[in-house]
Amino acid sequence: MDEVILKVDNISSGYEKHLVLKNLSFRINEGEIIGVIGPNGSGKTTLIRSLTRILPLKNGSIRFKNKDIIDISYKELAKEVAVVSQLNSSLFFSARVEEVILLGRIPHFRSFQLLEDRGDREIVEKVMKLTDIIELRERDLSEISGGERQRVFIARALAQQPKLLLLDEPTAHLDINHRLEIFKLVSHLAKEGGFTVLSVLHDLNLASRFCERLIILNNGEVAAQGLPEEVINKVKIREIYGAEVNVYQGEMSEKPQILY
């Protein structure tokens, strides 16, 4: 039986007096690739911020590897949980690709360590090869494509050597080809590296194709969770998104796909 790596139990959180998440509960087993979907404003990004302690909980608890996250220091949490956010202009600073990836090693620096050591550079070399960006190492982040940038940020997250990878709309603003490339990469790395993935997604077809289980949020609550074929259907999409769609079995996999 797979071990539960993340247990979210009856959590509520939000901003000042505005409650966004309301009594959310779910579990994730080690090695799973989980998709979180739902309409705009349903609480998907708030969930990521709650899981990483950026937002304090109003009630409930989050346990990572059977330990309450409030009892885990930010540095220790950063060693085991990495986040890749959606691309936005604030991330396009000027720096060499290799330097950006080396930032992922900071949580592992020892006391009084100011610079990376040989071991850190070996790990960075490995993740650059895994993400197929070794030829970009001397390039400036501001000069490469959106798809290449997102590979760099995934490599930086992998340099943290996480047990849990949180993806917050990692393919937003990318074209179809780059979206597929990113999720093929994540799926491959998760299987090879043995880490767990929770990804927030707007693209229901990508979520269905690459995720083993889906959690649908609506108005800050879990509206449904289960296998893609259990939660992606015409009735559920109409109920949650207010949209009439056709659902069919995809040509590339047996997972359900939506035709708008």
Image (tube, rainbow, N blue to C red):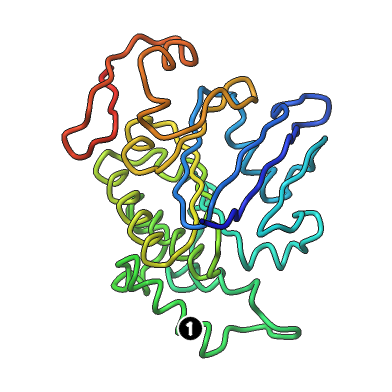
Q: How many marks?
A: 1
The residue sitting at the front extreme is: 1
Q: At x 75% / y 55%, what residue is drawn? A: 69
Horizontal relation, residue 173 to residue 135: left or right? right
The residue sitting at the bottom extreme is: 118
Q: Amino acid at mark 1?
A: Arg
Q: Nearer the viewer, residue 80 or 149?
A: 80
Q: Nearer the viewer, residue 159 or 207?
A: 207
Q: At x 63% / y 68%, what residue is drawn? A: 79
Horizontal relation, residue 55 to residue 167: left or right? right
Image position of 95 with respect to 49: above or below? below
Q: At x 76% / y 25%, what residue is drawn? A: 19
Q: At x 55% / y 63%, what residue is drawn? A: 163
Q: Which residue is mark 1?
A: 121
Instruction: Give the percent coordinates (x, y) of residue 209.
Output: 31, 39
Image position of 36 with respect to 122: above or below? above
Q: Quadrant of residue 130?
A: bottom left
Specify few, some or many for label 1: CA neighbours under 10 Å numbering under 14, 14-19, or 20 or more: some
Under tag 1, what secondary structure?
A: helix
Instruction: Give the percent coordinates (x, y) of residue 99.
Output: 49, 73
Instruction: Give the percent coordinates (x, y) of residue 41.
Output: 59, 24
Horizontal relation, residue 148 to residue 254: left or right? right
Image position of 73 with respect to 183: above or below? below
Q: Quadrant of residue 242?
A: top left
Q: Quick one: quadrant of the C terminus? A: top left
Q: Nearer the viewer, residue 196 or 88?
A: 196
Instruction: Give the percent coordinates (x, y) of residue 155.
Output: 44, 65
